[in-house]
Amino acid sequence: MKKIFWTQLNPLERLDRYIHTLWLLVLAVMVLFLRVEFMLALFLSGVLIFTAYLEYKSIKKKALEFEKQNKD
């Protein structure tokens, strides 16, 4: 059975799923630049990318700790 909910995933699976959902961020940034004024789109895309980067670092840290724990 596939795990469909975020809470059912272990940290390694969360990292993998998060990386795959970053394509949605790319799409959102492209839509911003097409539909919104340039300076506003630049600011909002910067905020989106910065928060995605921080979330990625957090999830990756947890995944590395999980992998280290399960290796032993």
Image (cartoon, rainbow, N blue to C red):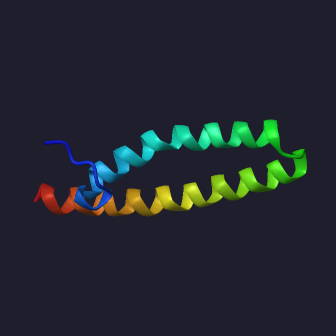
Total numbered circles: 0
Residue 29 vertical placement versus 40 (above, below): above
Quadrant for the N terminus in the image:
top left
Instruction: Farthest residue to the left: give it.
Output: 72
Q: Residue at x 37, y 45 (%)?
A: 17
Q: Residue at x 71, y 36 (%)?
A: 30
Q: Residue 4: percent from the left, percent from the top?
A: 27, 48
Q: Residue 34: percent from the left, percent from the top?
A: 80, 36
| Front residue (pair 44, 34) | 34
Q: Residue at x 89, y 46 (%)?
A: 37
**Left or right: 51 in relation to 57:** right
Residue 29 vertical placement versus 68 (above, below): above
Q: Residue at x 55, y 41 (%)?
A: 24
Q: Quadrant of residue 53?
A: bottom right
Q: Residue 72: percent from the left, percent from the top?
A: 10, 59
